[in-house]
Image (cartoon, rainbow, N blue to C red):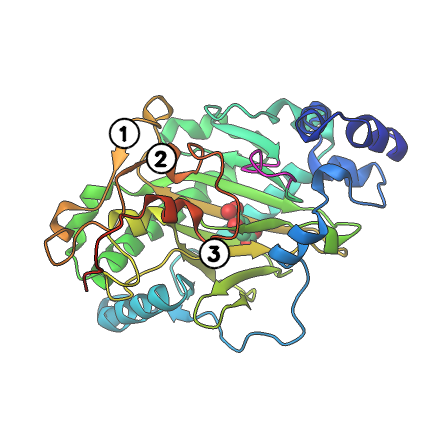
Amino acid sequence: MAASSVDSLYFDNAADSEEAARLFDETKGGVKGLVDSGITTVPKLFRLSPQTASQYGTTRSKSPCPFAVPVIDMKDLESRRAVVVEEIRRAAAELGMFQLVNHGVEVSVMEDMMAEARQFHEQPTELKQGYYSRDVTQKARFISGYGALRRSSFNWVDTLLMTPAPSDAQDHLPIICRDSATIFIGRIRELGETLSQLLSLALGLTPSTNEFISTNLTTANLNYYPPCPEPEVAIAANPHFDTSTFTILLQDQVGGLQVFHEGAADWVDVPSLHGALVVNIGNMLQVIFNCSQLLSNNKMKSAEHKVFANAIVPRQSVACFFMPPIDFSTMSTKMYGPIKELVSEKYPAVYREASLAALWGSLYPDLEGSLRNPVLARLRIAYDKEVV
Ligand SMILES: O=C(O)CCC(=O)C(=O)O
């Protein structure tokens, strides 16, 4: 498709952004399809207003934030468990994010995953468009503008979303990346089990408490960020908090991920470390574990993060979200709240119970604005006086 026809047909002539999104979806080619068509400017659907671009921060600040994302070594975990638990506790309290090395997932497994994910995204549109869908019940689907429908502009990213539970869901994955994804997901699932035990210990709970949250790997997103002709007017991933209990993220060597450091009120680079996996705490953990900065003594916080677009090379990541199993039929009715043993007179519930739909923000049409974590702000219980 010629660049001019993409521009005029799909974006410039659309009546509004909803119509533009619908027309864009019809191409089933994603952002990669646009880039391959030869566009030299960012289409309207992806273009941020100057105000939003400055609010998000689409370019790096000239004076980098001096904080570093902690790197936690899981080598000899059995003999070093207490040290690792303390490092996780500190990192989760300060930033809500850390990197793990020597975590047991082989570099070859991660490299194979990245290579096959790239093959999926870089194959001709005709071969992948059968997967293009906004049907959330589909177990493997390719989409652009994932999670962006409530915002005025789309992120500059294509995603293959995989819902790997139950185990037969593997059969639905595209053949081109099925083998590597099946192995990678299995290994990440094992690491997730270990991590939820370590997080429980870091919160002062017995690991068996995990039965309460039945945390599992529910979704794995294979993200592909094509080069962007005007990176300063678009964003690869807008600033956001994950809905998950926690997320394990594999990123390639390109860079662009940043996390917000509340203490410094600034964004910190999350550098690409060969063989490392990034972990970030999600909103679900704050709700279920009754965490808030005041009431739980800075125990853990959900990490706000974003990704810059870049003009030079494609970037890839694989985000694996751990949360209670998602049942779409009860998304608005099944409630999640603090584990009962964590609530007492001294430590009353911090947040109201919430459904997954509420945690995803989909129940609240008016969440955008200046609040940093509007979903949790909405769920927070107001007490006459704070209890510490
Ligand atoms: O690509 C990344 O580094 C982050 C991806 C992310 O934030 C997400 O998929 O929610």
Q: The residue tagged with tag 2: helix, strand or loop?
A: helix
Crowd tier of the residue under label 3, counting other residues whose Cα lies within 10 Å: few below 14, some 14–19, many 20 or above: many
Hey, what amino acid is under mark 1? Answer: Lys
Circle 1 sits on which residue?
Answer: 334
Marks 2 and 3, how far apart in space? 19 Å
Circle 2 sits on which residue?
Answer: 356
Q: Residue at x 60, y 74 (%)?
A: 64
Circle 3 sits on which residue?
Answer: 304
- Please tell me whether the stretch drawn in magenta is mainly helix, strand or loop: loop
Q: Assess whether mark 1 and mark 2 are in contact (beta carbons under 8 angstroms).
A: yes
Q: The residue tagged with tag 3: helix, strand or loop?
A: loop
Is residue 74 visible to the viewer in this orientation of the structure? no
Q: Is residue 119 left or right of residue 74?
A: right
Q: Assess whether mark 3 and mark 2 are in contact (beta carbons under 8 angstroms).
A: no
The percent coordinates of residue 320 (x first, y second) are 44, 46
Mark 2 and mark 1 lie on one chain; the one further toward the N terminus is: 1
Magenta stretch holds residue 150:
yes
